[in-house]
């Protein structure tokens, strides 16, 4: 019964909310029938036709293997592709870079092109067969039935993985930062995939042709947070996003371009007409101090209470943990390093934050698996700003961030050592 109530609340927050309009039209939450539910039985609508997202990805891998003439099993093909991907990631990470990936809009255009191509080949196949030039063996009905959709299967139409990643991050970010009621177990097994073909067949909107839908299920681990803590976490994401901008790891790739963009951004915010150059080292130290103080205020503890520990924890748990950011370590090695240098303390006081952390790690980890790395703080920043603005607290947080900015050659005598500031 608790899961039924959880599911109903999530559904109402996302679907029966006039404030958000049609933002979640492509997200399906199954309707629960509480009068049919018992203590041990949950009754809800079937999301049909759909398959688990994991199976849809395996089917796509199988099609890719066939297209490339791979002779082994799908698992062998996926292992081979994973090994290739790892090699590319490591080569890029050595240079402080991520491998290139397409965005959702670009992928949508490619999918639309491939769908049109498949449709054209399908149309062309009819006159060819009618004229008797079909390559199918007409004496073998089984073979003809197997090959009757060659024009469709020969054209690879990929799943729009960038769009799926964007949607999953947005809907769960909305649950956490706007609703304060979220699913703490968003692993891929709890995500159903409705292909564009099935979606368009049941939709009157022609624009749905190249658009999938996602079904979100299993609300046994729903967490609710109060408004005070929700706003503290919104601030956490904004401080993390801003602090990471001044981190040397962020500046490493396309250094000159990144420095120029950040200089312009913060000079405009500070209304500096002369556009001074930011002292990144001093600014980053202030950012570390500010963010670590905020995390300690929330209740996070470590053995030595080092600001660097709190900062690193935020950049990984609420930011990004791709190979370029962690290089030369991987995630497990980084965790071991943190625990050996400054072990985390009792997390009882911050168990709500731990649930949000786990939700973010699930989502970002899935992004790595489908070659869609993301920075969680950047993805959730617009929602964090919305939450703080609605509570009239956004200006306060943005002012704190601007106070970090130190320009080169500015007198910064009050910029003490970060450890002394924390004390």
Image (cartoon, rainbow, N blue to C red):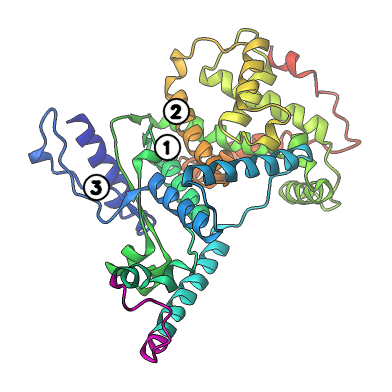
List the residue tagged with mark 3.
30
- Disc 2 to disc 3, C-alpha distance: 29 Å
Residue 138, above or below 275: below
Please provide percent x and percent y for residue 324: 70, 37
Residue 351, above or below 82: above
Label 2–label 3 contact, CB within 8 A? no
Q: Nearer the viewer, residue 151 or 70?
A: 70
Residue 127 colored magenta? yes
Residue 32 shows in this picture: yes
Name the quadrant of the C terminus: top right
Crowding near pointer 1: few (<14 within 10 Å), some, many (20+)? many
Residue 152, above or below 30: below
At 53% from the left edge and 38% from the top edge, which residue is drawn?
364
Residue 229: mark: 2
Residue 246 shows in this picture: no
Crowding near pointer 3: few (<14 within 10 Å), some, many (20+)? some
At 43% from the left edge and 20% from the top edge, which residue is drawn?
351
The stretch of residues the image draws in magenta is: 126-141
Name the quadrant of the N terminus: top left
Q: Nearer the viewer, residue 233 or 54?
A: 54
As drawn, the residue found furthest toward the right would be 409
Please provide percent x and percent y for residue 34: 12, 39
């Amino acid at each position: 019964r608790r899961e039924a109530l959880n599911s109903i609340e999530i559904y109402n927050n996302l679907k029966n909310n006039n404030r958000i309009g049609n933002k979640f039209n492509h997200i399906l939450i199954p309707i629960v029938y509480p009068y049919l539910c018992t203590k041990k039985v949950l009754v809800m609508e079937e999301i049909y036709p759909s398959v688990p997202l994991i199976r849809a990805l395996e089917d796509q891998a199988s099609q890719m293997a066939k297209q490339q003439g791979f002779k082994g099993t799908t698992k062998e093909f996926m292992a081979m592709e994973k090994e290739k991907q790892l090699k590319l990631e490591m080569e890029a990470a050595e240079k402080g870079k991520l491998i290139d990936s397409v965005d959702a809009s670009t992928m949508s255009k490619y999918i639309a092109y491939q769908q049109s191509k498949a449709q054209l080949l399908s149309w062309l196949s009819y006159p060819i067969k009618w004229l008797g030039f079909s390559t199918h063996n007409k004496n073998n009905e089984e073979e003809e039935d197997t090959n009757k959709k060659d024009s469709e299967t020969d054209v690879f139409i990929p799943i729009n993985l960038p769009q799926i990643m964007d949607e999953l991050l947005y809907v769960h970010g909305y649950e956490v930062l706007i609703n304060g009621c979220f699913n703490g177990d968003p692993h891929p097994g709890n995500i159903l995939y409705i292909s564009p073909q099935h979606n368009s067949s049941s939709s009157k909107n022609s624009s749905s042709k190249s658009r999938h839908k996602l079904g979100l299920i299993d609300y046994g681990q729903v967490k609710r947070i109060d408004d005070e803590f929700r706003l503290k976490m919104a601030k956490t994401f904004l401080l993390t996003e801003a602090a990471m901008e001044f981190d040397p790891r962020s500046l490493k790739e396309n250094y000159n371009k990144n420095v120029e963009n950040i200089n312009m951004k913060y000079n405009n915010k500070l209304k500096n007409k002369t556009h001074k150059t930011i002292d990144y080292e001093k600014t980053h130290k202030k950012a570390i101090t500010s963010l670590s103080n905020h995390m300690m205020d929330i209740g996070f503890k470590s053995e030595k209470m080092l600001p660097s520990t709190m900062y690193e924890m935020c950049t990984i748990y609420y930011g990004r943990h791709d190979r370029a950011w962690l290089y030369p370590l991987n995630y497990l090695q980084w965790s071991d390093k943190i625990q050996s240098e400054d072990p985390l303390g009792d997390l009882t006081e911050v168990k709500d934050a731990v649930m949000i952390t786990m939700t973010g790690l699930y989502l970002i980890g899935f992004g790595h698996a489908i070659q869609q790395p993301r920075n969680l703080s950047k993805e959730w920043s617009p929602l964090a700003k919305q939450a703080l603005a609605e509570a009239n607290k956004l200006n306060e947080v943005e002012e704190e961030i601007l106070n970090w900015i130190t320009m080169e050659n500015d007198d910064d005598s009050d910029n003490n050592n970060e450890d002394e500031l924390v004390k």
